[in-house]
Amino acid sequence: MDKLERMGFRGICYNLMKTYLMNRKQYTVINNCTSDRRNVSIGVPQGSILGPLLYLLYVHSLKFLRLQCEHFMYADDTALVFSGSKGECENLVNCNLEKYFNWQQ
């Protein structure tokens, strides 16, 4: 929701998205045995019409991070690929993962 707000979602549009994404629960059924309902605090409803659009909005700003690696995105997966010596890669991975982690917030 924070990312949507930073992207300019306000008012009715923001509240509609918040209602759609917040306070969801899920459960699993296996052999007619149903699990407890649990709150879902991340992600979007699987199989939803808005899922792909929300994913694209979420990853749109990834290109502005200027990561020092190759990144590949397919469907809802992202892979960061590093190359170099062990020491170089260790530093690059740590630096870039910190950027990536802060970007997700």
Image (cartoon, rainbow, N blue to C red):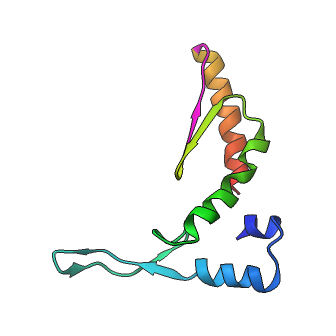
Q: On screen, 65 above or below 1?
A: above
Q: Position of residue 31 (x, y in %)?
A: 16, 75
Query: Which residue is pictured at 50% across the width and 72% down the height?
Result: 48
The answer to whether one can see residue 9 in this image is yes
The quarter of the picture where the N terminus appears is: bottom right
Residue 82 magenta: yes
Coordinates of residue 45 in the picture (x, y in percent): 50, 72
Is 81 on the left-hand or right-hand side of 28? right
The residue at the point 29 percent across, 78 percent down is: 35
Q: Is residue 8 magenta?
A: no
Left or right of 90 on screen, residue 37: left
Whether 53 is drawn above or below 39: the answer is: above
Magenta span of residues: 78-85
Q: At x 38% / y 81%, what residue is drawn?
A: 37
Q: Position of residue 57 (x, y in %)?
A: 69, 60
Count of all numbered marks drawn on residues in the image: 0
Most extreme residue toward the left, as rendered? Answer: 31
Which of these two is toward me, 33 or 53?
A: 53
Residue 29 in which image quadrant: bottom left
Q: Position of residue 82 (x, y in %)?
A: 60, 25
Kindly identify the residue that appears in the image at 60 percent across and 81 percent down: 20
Assign the C terminus to one quadrant of the image: bottom right
Q: Nearer the viewer, residue 2 or 87?
A: 2
Whether residue 42 is visible: no
Which of the 4 image quarters holds residue 58? bottom right
Q: In the image as oriented, which residue stretches furthest toward the front?
A: 49
